[in-house]
Image: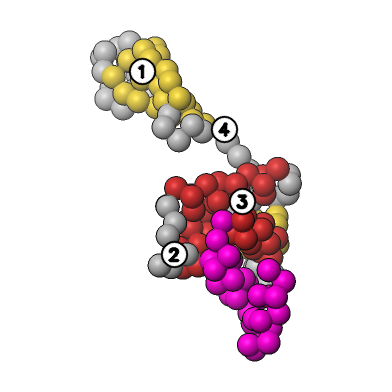
Amino acid sequence: MICPYCKCDKNRVVNSRSASDGKSIRRRRECLECLGRFTTYESVETIPILVVKKNNSRQKFNRDKLISRLLIAFGKRPIDLDVLKNVVFEVENELISLFLEEVQSYKIAEITMRKLKKIDVVAYIRFASVYYEFSSVEEFMEELRKL
């Protein structure tokens, strides 16, 4: 690790602990040359998951995009933001556990809907209505009947 003050690469770890996100380690370091202190974070490097869209384009999985879609689905519903973050965390972990470099967008939607169904049926229907692209009231009602 290079010191941000003097650019020396000799330093020692003064303190090490788990970071607040639980997914990384926070290390407090001291430069052996200038005695300056700085913080570094160490985390597991994961291979990015590519999402294959309906039109066969590919983009990197974006948890912020999923959170924004969930916020729309839960619009004016009594839900804690931590619950939504946990849903996204669970979806991402499930995707990682599949050991796939690429995943179809419908798979992400299905995993998300399965989790939403357990949390809030109204949010589930809102999310499903966008995913299934209901073109009629009958299609919408059919999904409601399944519940």
Relative to 142, say whether 107 is above or below.
above
Highlighted range, magenta = 119-147
Q: Are marks 1 and 4 in contact (CB under 8 Å)?
A: no
**Which disc, if any, is residue 44?**
4
Residue identified by numbered label 2? 77
Q: Residue at x 71, y 79 (%)?
A: 142
Look at label 3 and name its amino acid.
Val
Q: Residues within 10 Å of mark 4 (few under 14, many from 20)?
A: few
Disc 3 on helix, strand or loop? Answer: helix
Q: Residue at x 41, y 25 (%)?
A: 26
Cα distance between the residues tagged 4 and 3: 18 Å
Location of the C terminus (image quadrant)? bottom right
Q: State the residue in front, 46 or 143.
A: 143
Q: Are marks 3 and 2 in contact (CB under 8 Å)?
A: no
Residue identified by numbered label 3? 91
- Residue 10 in sight here: no
Q: Position of residue 3 (x, y in %)?
A: 34, 23
Task: Indicate whether residue 3 is drawn in magenta.
Answer: no
Cα distance between the residues tagged 1 and 4: 19 Å
Colouring of the image: secondary structure
Look at label 1 and name its amino acid.
Arg
Give whichever of discs 3 and 1 has the lower sequence position. 1
Q: Residue at x 59, y 59 (%)?
A: 116
Give whichever of discs 2 and 4 has the lower sequence position. 4
Look at label 2 and name its amino acid.
Arg
Relative to 38, say whether 85 is above or below.
below
Q: Position of residue 65 (x, y in %)?
A: 50, 60
In which image quadrant can residue 129 be found? Answer: bottom right
